[in-house]
Amino acid sequence: MLKNFIPEGVADLNYDEYEKIQSIENSLVKVFSDSGYRQIQTPTFEYFDLFASESVSAGTEDMYKIMDANGKMMVLRPDATIPIARMIATTHKRNDGEIKLMYVTNVYRSADFRAGERREFKQAGIEYFGTCSPETDANVIETAIKALSAAGFSDLKTELGDSNYFSGLLDELEKDGKITLKEQTTHLRELIETKNVPAIQMFADDNGIEGKSREVLLALPVLFGDMDDVITRATELALNDKMREAIENVKAIKEVMGDSIEISVDMGLVNRLEYYSGMIFKVYLKNTGVIVGSGGRYDQLMTKFGRDIPAVGFGLNVNTLFDALGADASDSQVLNIALGKGRLADTTVKQLQSIGIEFPDYSKESRKLFFTDSTGKFRIIFVKAVDVGIYVEKGACDVGVIGKDTLLESGSDVFEMLDLGFGKCKFAVAAPDGFKYDKTKKLRVATKYPNVAKQYFAKMGRSIEIIKINGSVELAPLIGLSDVIVDIVETGTTLKENGLSVVEEIADISARFIVNRASLKTKEKQVAEIMEALRERNQQ
Ligand code: PRP
């Protein structure tokens, strides 16, 4: 019987769904078209080489690759903008002037199925070539907002930044010899993009970044909020003309737009893709933890194709819009805090109480899974510890407290804003006392953390076999299931009592305060209130 033959990460659409998606698409296309954009289409298959350069595209490992009959590597279009840039680079004539294009196209990337992501999704957007001015940038943002409103989204928040602010800081770090390698730049860009504050601190320590540069670097992840406040602070921090020009550009764009759109600023906004070269923006749907659109200026991408043509654009994920239309907006007044049942949760509740957030009904013995604080502003939600990341990533909870071990393992796409300093332990490789590593054999590793173990041994260039188990991992090497274990070690008692010892330390672990990408901006006051109080408390 041929049943259930649908791959993960793709979906059939029934006629109801299809018609709804079509109606969203039609609304978007109408606004784009009324704004002077003309529709184009690029092929589904592209040469891998087009996307292979790191500076053009992120994550070649996420692309679907196919070998053609001539042995040439092809990919299914993993991005909408790069093929359009290629098309314009090869067809644009010197006197063509401005070109305004729009597209609705499927994009293919490998996805995190655990998080319900799709490997095929529909993207709609515009690309505006041949002009560079605050007016053009403002116009592109306004078109995005108009299109989203036409598709039924009115409760939006737009955020503006300029990638040259971060790029100006990079210039200083390079000039001072603090950054010498391309990999360091890529790593730092990723840390800023994910607002990974503890890791940024570590980066500054490891690379001897001190003084004003350090101050700017550590300020970047929180350099967002009301326009006037952020601009004042960013101006105080600016280290060179590039950074000052970035601020001026943001101010100029905002001035063109006036008060028609609710705009805030994030000067720490960067994109994983390096080709962004100026204005960047994101649009959030209030109260849902969803980013509905993003875009920016990418003049540098055109220079990769050997052409000096300014370009700006944005993309909207039509499937995300479809899901968001049906989603119930959460209660905007309450900040939902995900806590993993167990050790970290107890300490977190105590810490929250010590900063004045009381949960009168809470008791450790209760089987109830959520409690609201006495002010009605905060709600703690008890989930399984391994699920904290996914609840926050998907916006079901706005913030969460999670062990770095679980966060590393899940790879959740969230902002890691604070090292809470408790729940300290280590990731380690442990083995029975007297264990000798036999290089001629594949090492058998039992663990609750297969991703962490895989990454660690891959980095070490050692070939291993992973045996995933769910608890009491220490038993595995004792009864011959594995040679070693990868696990967390807190006091070391469990290892000691079972005749095992640490043979290699992998990483330090502690509890982290994580924040949903959209909630940081749409519930910024509540997030800041709790985050600042916890930060101060843990610094004492
Ligand atoms: C964790 C870990 C170790 C133990 C380490 O297990 O997997 O077994 O704690 O702590 P120690 O160094 O202080 O002895 P957990 O208590 O979560 O139980 P589990 O093994 O059933 O997952």
Image (tube, grey):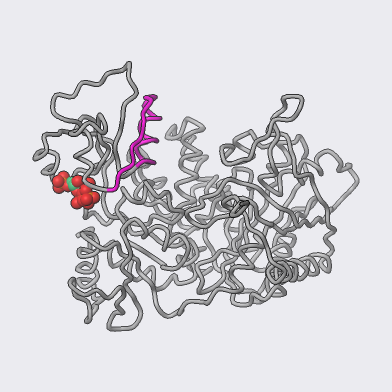
Task: Tell me which corner region of the image, top left, top right, bottom left or bottom right, holds residue 157.
Answer: bottom right
Task: Tell me which corner region of the image, top left, top right, bottom left or bottom right, holds residue 345.
Answer: bottom left
Could you tell whether 102 is left or right of 252 in the image? right
Q: Give the residue displayed 79% in from the left and 44% down from the top.
A: 43
Magenta segment includes 275: no
Residue 372 at what x, y percent from top left? 31, 79
Instruction: Report the number of discs.
Output: 0
* Residue stretch rendered in magenta on the structure: 450-470
The foreground one among 254 and 54 is 54
Could you tell whether 500 is left or right of 537 in the image? left
Q: Determine whether 114 is above or below 489 in the image.
A: below
Q: Determine whether 157 is above or below 299 in the image.
A: below
Quadrant of the snapshot with the C terminus: bottom left
The foreground one among 142 and 431 is 431
Q: Residue furthest top?
A: 440
Residue 103 at what x, y percent from top left? 77, 56
Q: Which residue lies furthest to the front in this view?
A: 1
Residue 538 at what x, y percent from top left? 23, 59
Q: Residue furthest left?
A: 497
Task: Tell me which corner region of the image, top left, top right, bottom left or bottom right, holds residue 457.
Answer: top left
Residue 354 at what x, y percent from top left? 20, 71
Q: Determine whether 336 is above or below 502 in the image.
A: below
The foreground one among 4 and 426 is 4
Q: Give the residue displayed 30% in from the left and 33% down from the top.
A: 445
Could you tell whether 234 is left or right of 310 in the image? left
Question: From this viewpoint, is residue 245 visible?
Answer: no
Question: From this viewpoint, is residue 435 visible?
Answer: yes
